[in-house]
Amino acid sequence: MKIAIGSDHGGFELKEIVKPLLEELGHEVQDVGCYSLDSVDYPKQAKEVVSLIRAGKAERGILICGTGIGMSIAANRYPGIRATLCHEPFTAEMSRRHNDSNILCMGGRVIGPGLALEMVKVWLTTPFDGGRHSRRLCQIDKAEEECS
């Protein structure tokens, strides 16, 4: 799977821990930055990951900032993006099963590396359940009357 990953300075260290796991699992990783602990504005990296997904150049994305909140807000501005802020494996799993999330957001100052790696594994391997959940996603993207 092609995965785009990005962070701000608050998520940089966790991004550098997550990237090798993605590669080890056989995924093609595109790192859009940041590339150091120097302060940056997180909306830029969010937009880069979103752009790759919307253009079909990445299937999913991972965004990491200090809390994950800013990245999730910035990414969810764009149509077709379902960025979910998760703090443990159950929400990561359910974000895929029920919401078909295409971006996982995490807080580098909120969760530790072990938990983050576990969440990434769960998020990458959990399928979308479809069914009634597809109808609900349609209602997010379109007028309710268009969805059955």
Image (tube, rainbow, N blue to C red):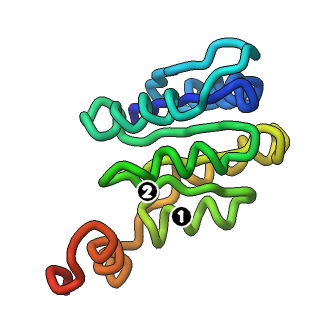
Q: Which residue is mark 2?
A: 82
Screen quadrant of the N terminus = top left
The amino acid type found where label 2 is placed reads: Arg
Choose the circle earlier in sequence order: 2 or 1. Answer: 2
- Viewer-nearest residue: 31 or 39: 39
Q: Quadrant of residue 133?
A: bottom left
Q: Residue at x 76, y 16 (%)?
A: 37
Q: Which residue is mark 1?
A: 95
Q: Nearer the viewer, residue 32 or 47?
A: 47
Q: Position of residue 88 (x, y in %)?
A: 74, 59
Q: Is residue 108 above or below residue 103?
A: above
| 135 relative to 109 in the view: left or right | left
* Circles 2 and 1: CB atoms closer than 8 Å: yes
Q: Is disc 1 placed on a helix, strand or loop?
A: helix
Q: Name the residue located 72 percent from the left edge and 31 percent from the top edge.
A: 11
Which residue is depicted at the point 36% across and 40% down? 59
